[in-house]
Amino acid sequence: MARSQTTIVLAAGAAAAWAVTVDRMRGMDDGPGTDLGGLGWYLGIWVTMTAAMMLPSAAPAARHVARHGAPTVLFTAGYLAIWTGYGLLAYGIFRLVTSFDVAWLAWNRSGPLAAGCAIVAAGLYELTRLKRISLRRCRSALHGNAFQCGLTHGFACVGCSGALMAVLFVLGAMSLFWMAAVAVVIFAEKALPRGPRLAPIFAVALVVLGMWVAVSPATVPGLTEPRGSSSMEMSS
């Protein structure tokens, strides 16, 4: 019974988060280098985004924790706390990079190549030992109190899916299309019975996508090219 309730709670939370995210982010996608806005606004949308994208894939772990009578809300709080830390780190890196002269990242210069290389790197990460270990931990039983289990699962999930989330930043942090695509990949790897066997397939797909973005970004479905002459340069 507790496991069924956990699934319902997480599904409802994810659905609500998707609804809020779609409402707040509709029309905001400016492609690679999309400005992340002020820290307060960014944190609000980031937590909502990660809840929408990650809670479905965290359901199996949450159900295991709930089987021992642990509150789902504490597991979720610990889990989202780790992803919030990841989001803050990403925000800091973005602000640091855009504080320098990044004219070379203009979309009509080296922007597509830089974006493509980042995506290819994420694809290659799918084949690493660290990825395999993190994915295995994501799919393993958890032990401890609910909040601690949420933290543990969050760390494993960042190790497993952090590179995929970086792809979202590269392609457009406010893109609902790429947000949904990344969420599907994460769910498939973490929750489907043959999820680990899909990682090499996703690796190839990311490498191909990266090369496509680098060579002919205008033809990539769902990719919004920056309206200005640059990507990250737009935010500096």
Image (spheres, rainbow, N blue to C red):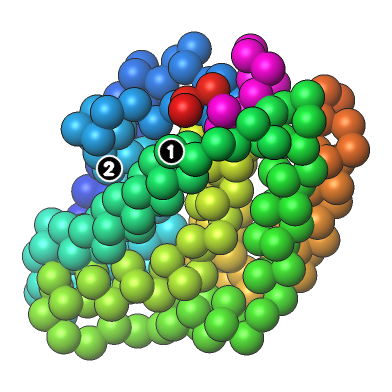
Provide the residue designation for mark 2: 47
Residue at disc 1, secondary structure: loop
Amino acid marked by disc 1: Ser
Which of the two residues, 94 or 85, is positioned nearer the viewer here? Answer: 94
- The answer to whether residue 139 shows anywhere in this view is no
Placement of the N terminus among the 4 image quadrants: bottom left
Q: Which residues are magenta?
A: 220-233
Q: Residue furthest front?
A: 101
- The answer to whether residue 79 shows anywhere in this view is yes
Query: Vertical placement of 72 versus 175: above or below?
Result: below
Amino acid marked by disc 2: Val
Query: Vertical placement of 44 versus 197: above or below?
Result: above
Pointer 2 local density, CA inside 10 Å: few below 14, some 14–19, many at least 20: some
Q: Left or right: where does residue 97 sit relative to residue 47? A: right
Quarter occupied by residue 3: bottom left
| Overall secondary structure of the magenta section | loop
User: Which numbered disc covers residue 142?
Assistant: none
Q: Are marks 1 and 2 in contact (CB under 8 Å)?
A: no
Residue at disc 2, secondary structure: helix
Which residue is located at x 16 percent, y 77 percent?
148
User: Which numbered disc covers residue 99?
Assistant: 1
Earlier-in-chain disc, 1 versus 2 = 2
Nearer to us: label 1 or label 2? 1
Which residue is located at x 62 percent, y 86 percent?
129
Query: Vertical placement of 181 versus 176: above or below?
Result: below
- Residue 60 coordinates in the image, percent (x, y): 37, 67
Q: Left or right: where does residue 9 sit relative to residue 35? A: left
For the residues labelled 1 and 2, the Cα–Cα distance comes to 25 Å
- Residue 199 coordinates in the image, percent (x, y): 69, 68
Q: Is residue 223 magenta?
A: yes
Q: Is residue 53 magenta?
A: no
- Residue 112 coordinates in the image, percent (x, y): 76, 36
